[in-house]
Image (cartoon, rainbow, N blue to C red):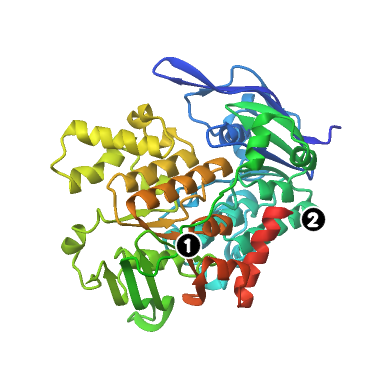
Amino acid sequence: MSDKILEIDDLSIAFTVSGEASTAVHGSSFDIKKGETVALVGESGSGKSITALSVLKLLPQAASYPTGKILFKGQDILSASEDELRKIRGNDITMIFQEPMTSLNPLHTIEKQIAEILELHKGMTGKAARERVIELLTQVGIRDPETRLSAYPHQMSGGQRQRVMIAMALANEPELLIADEPTTALDVTVQAQILELLKELQEKNGLSMLFITHDLGIVRRIADRCCVMQNGHIVEKGETEKIFTKPQHDYTKHLLSAEPKGSPPASDTSALVVLEASDMKVWFPIKKGLMRRTVDHVKAVDGIDLILREGQTLGVVGESGSGKTTLGMALTRLISSQGKIAFVGKDINAYSFKEMRGLRDQMQVVFQDPYGSLSPRMSVGEIIAEGLTIHNKELNRDQREAMVINALEETGLDPETRHRYPHEFSGGQRQRIAIARAIVLEPRFIMLDEPTSALDMSVQAQVVDLLRDLQKRRKLAYMFISHDLKVVKALANEVIVMRLGKVVEQGSSKQIFENPQTDYTKALMAAAFDIKTK
């Protein structure tokens, strides 16, 4: 009997739109053995995710398979009936999707969503199901899991939502786990924990994995074998260590050499203060009992001071749930807060919605989850032009179109794609669309919430160069929230390290990266270094 749990042989994938067929994957072949991890690596749009989705036959009806077979333990997935596929999906093969906010049901609690899988496939209900849910949440690093059972997806950070997705995928102890960028939204310490967890599960249960990622450091750490994809073709495959030490294909060499380079601009304490916060607090009440009385508070941001100057970048790092995104949302007045917030000398903390609207073109945001922040009913051109329509009413249609085209070119996208819709793009391409939407208004301040988390390594480097160039030419002030410390080091002049709503360390980028003072900061640095080098 073959020890191969999955065999993909000469697989081609085509899509038919308006009667015209285009091939996205060309004759790909690889296999996965029991207990083995195989990584699919390549830039956004290379065909990694649609290859993975094909294993569970989850592509839309427009997809077809001109050639090839997908065999799971000898059974042909492409010719399997819906009943046969239902037995395999979620039980024998599970998948962790790239964007948890769009994969989790916003109307159901975390407990209900995980327990639903246990009930459907194992008949587990009641106390047994709850205990298993708590066990799974503990495994994936959710603090105090009993208190998070009644939480909804929007009440959790991006990293916490991704951990819930991993818990759901592992619930039924599958034989094959397809992980599509499973650590994209996770901070470096939790990345290390999740990778160790997956390794333990492999050793314990003989779990096989198809691991899709753009983070080559993670590939080297977790994968036994590696397949490199470019434009729908597998251009190189083999043992991971050989791929990294002796790459044969030019594209593989390009990926291995791609990383954010350069240094942030020199700190300038005489530059204009664009944004200043003093004793900022964001406390969320905890209400209990019949009368819903406030018994305590979740102190998401607790007494933070910061100054951000023109042409400078403030990096904000810390684990998921530390308050990084909440701080950014409060500074841009997207949520309420206490304390002082001054934008170019004006105290804006008491501004009404109408008053803030006049500043929105000057204060832009690039959100962590591009798919969730882009309207699925608007074309890319309409999405990018929407802000111009609201804030630059004096522009005519041709002028707006020219600015949209320029923004797309600056972010590395073909202007002809402006007539397409967000679902027609890869995760990395959608993030670039979100960046284009922000820069088109030529703001003074941009809050960037994990803007490179969904991007492959070479595009990360391009985006860092783009952001640095835009900053230099337009004297932009950035607040850069990220768990990727290498990107933060390349962009940020100043860094604040957050934990549980407080700043545990603050200083120049050089000081934080070269001589961290607190054990927490040292642990972040060590985890990032391990993931990048092992």
Residue 527 place in picture, x, y as percent: 66, 63
Residue 132 place in picture, x, y as percent: 64, 63
Q: Residues within 10 Å of mark 2 (few under 14, many from 20)?
A: few
As rendered, which of 298 and 57 lies closer to the eye?
Answer: 298
Looking at the image, residue 353 lies above or below residue 106: below
Q: Residues within 10 Å of mark 1 (few under 14, many from 20)?
A: many
Direction from residue 490 to residue 267 in the image, left or right:
left
Amino acid carrying label 1: it is: Ser
Q: Quarter holding the C terminus?
A: bottom right
Q: Residue at x 80, y 53 (%)?
A: 203
Q: Residue at x 39, y 52 (%)?
A: 471
Residue 96 place in picture, x, y as percent: 59, 47
User: Residue farthest to the top?
Assistant: 19
Label 1 residue SS:
loop
Residue wearing tag 2: 204
Label 2 residue SS:
helix
Q: Which label is found at residue 157?
A: 1
Direction from residue 461 to residue 291 in the image, left or right:
left
Q: Which mark is nearer the camera, 1 or 2?
A: 1
Amino acid carrying label 2: it is: Lys
Looking at the image, residue 152 lies above or below residue 278: above
